[in-house]
C-alpha cells in the first residue's frame, strides 16, 4: 500500500508543479503519520493530500501553495473544506507543529550547486556548457530521487548519503568524469566506496524500470492493515464510515472515526 500512496503523492505534486523538496517532505510526513495510526480506506487520499498541503506550505512560495479545492479534485471532491481543515489540525497536533525536516531532496539541491565543475569531462572532452550539463544532471538526479522514495529500504541510510548516491548515479548517467570528484567528496563527506551499495541498489531499480518492485515486501508497507491501492475509488469503504455518514458528521468526529493509534503509539 505504501508504494501506491507514494505514487499518488508524486502524481499530485507533479500535476501541481510543486518542488521535488515538497514531494519528499510530503512522503516523510506521510510515513511518520501512517506509522503511528491505523487509517480507514476512505481516509487514505485525505491523509496523503493533507501531507502535500502541509509540505507545500512549508516549502513553496505562497503563490504556489495549492488551494484545498485543487487538492480535493484528486479525491473526486468527496471531502468538505471543514474535513480538510480538521485533518490539517489533526496532523499538526500529531507533529506538535514541527513539520520541517531536511530530506534527501534538500541535500541533493545543495550538492547539485557544485554538481558540475569546469574540470569535468564528458567522454574525455571538456564540458562546453556548464548550464546544459547541470540541467541534464538535475534531470537524472530527480529521477533517482523518485526511486529512493519508493521503498522503506532506503530509510536505513542517512538522507545525506541517499542524496549523494543519487547525484553520483546522476553524474554516471550524464557521462561526467570523474564520477565522484574530490570536491563533491569534501562537500558531502562521503567517498565513493561508502556509496557503492546504495548506488548499486538505485541503479538496479532505475534500470529495471520497475519503480515499485520492492514495495511488495512485507517490511515495505505501513502498518495500517489495508492493501487497497489509492488509485481505487476513495468512497469504497472498508469500515462503517461511508462518505454519506462523513458528510453528516461534524468534521472532527468524522476524522477521528477514520483513525486509531497503533499499539506501539498507545504504549508510548
Image (cartoon, rainbow, N blue to C red):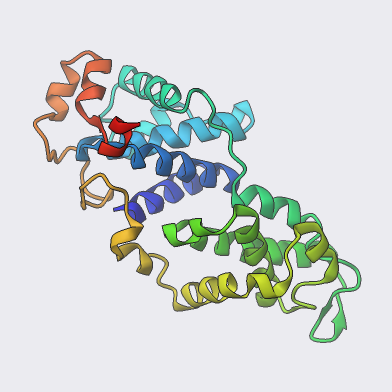
| Outermost bottom residue | 124
**Residue 19 visible in this rendered orientation of the protein:** no
What residue sits 32% from the left and 34% below the top? 265
What residue sits 29% from the left and 21% below the top? 80
54 or 232: nearer the viewer: 54
Q: Quadrant where the C terminus lies?
A: top left
Residue 35, compared with residue 58, is above or below; it is below
Locate residue 247, reporting x and y percent.
Answer: 19, 20
103 or 113: nearer the viewer: 103
77 or 228: nearer the viewer: 228
| Outermost front residue | 267
Decide if residue 132 is on the left or right side of residue 258. Answer: right
Locate residue 230, reporting x and y percent.
Answer: 28, 48
Locate residue 185, reporting x and y percent.
Answer: 79, 65
What residue sits 35% from the left and 42% below the top? 35
Locate residue 69, reporting x and y percent.
Answer: 39, 27
Residue 7, compared with residue 264, is above or below; it is below
| Outermost left residue | 240
**Residue 22 visible in this rendered orientation of the protein:** yes
What residue sits 65% from the left and 55% below the top? 160
200 or 55: nearer the viewer: 200
Decide if residue 228 is on the left or right side of residue 49. Answer: left
Q: Determine which quarter of the picture holds residue 258.
A: top left
Total numbered circles: 0
Residue 70, compared with residue 90, is above or below; it is below
Decide if residue 106 is on the left or right side of residue 236. Answer: right
Amino acid at each position: 500500500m505504501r508504494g501506491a500512496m507514494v505514487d499518488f503523492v508524486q502524481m499530485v505534486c507533479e500535476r501541481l508543479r510543486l518542488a521535488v523538496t515538497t514531494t519528499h517532505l510530503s512522503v516523510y510526513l506521510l510515513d511518520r503519520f501512517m506509522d503511528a495510526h491505523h487509517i480507514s480506506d476512505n481516509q487514505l487520499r485525505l491523509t496523503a493530500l493533507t501531507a502535500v498541503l502541509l509540505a507545500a506550505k512549508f516549502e513553496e512560495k505562497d503563490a504556489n501553495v495549492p488551494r484545498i479545492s485543487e487538492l480535493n479534485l484528486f479525491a473526486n471532491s468527496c471531502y468538505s473544506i471543514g474535513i480538510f481543515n480538521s485533518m490539517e489540525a489533526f496532523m499538526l497536533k500529531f507533529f506538535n507543529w514541527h513539520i520541517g525536516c531536511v530530506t534527501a531532496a534538500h541535500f541533493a539541491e545543495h550538492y547539485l550547486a557544485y554538481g558540475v565543475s569546469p574540470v569535468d569531462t564528458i567522454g574525455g572532452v571538456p564540458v562546453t556548457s556548464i548550464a546544459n550539463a547541470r540541467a541534464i544532471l538535475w534531470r537524472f538526479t530527480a529521477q533517482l530521487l523518485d526511486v529512493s522514495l519508493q521503498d522503506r529500504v532506503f530509510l536505513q541510510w542517512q538522507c545525506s548519503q541517499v542524496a549523494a548516491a543519487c547525484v553520483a548515479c546522476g553524474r554516471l548517467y550524464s557521462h561526467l568524469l570523474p564520477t565522484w570528484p574530490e570536491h563533491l567528496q569534501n562537500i558531502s563527506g562521503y567517498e565513493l566506496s561508502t556509496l557503492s551499495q546504495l548506488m548499486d541498489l538505485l541503479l538496479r531499480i532505475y534500470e529495471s524500470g520497475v519503480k515499485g518492485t520492492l514495495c511488495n515486501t512485507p517490511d515495505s508497507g505501513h502498518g495500517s492493515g489495508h492493501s487497497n491501492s489509492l488509485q481505487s475509488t476513495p468512497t469504497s469503504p472498508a469500515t462503517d464510515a461511508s462518505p454519506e455518514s462523513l458528510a453528516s458528521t461534524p468534521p472532527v468526529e468524522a476524522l477521528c472515526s477514520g483513525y486509531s493509534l497503533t499499539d506501539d503509539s498507545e504504549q508510548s
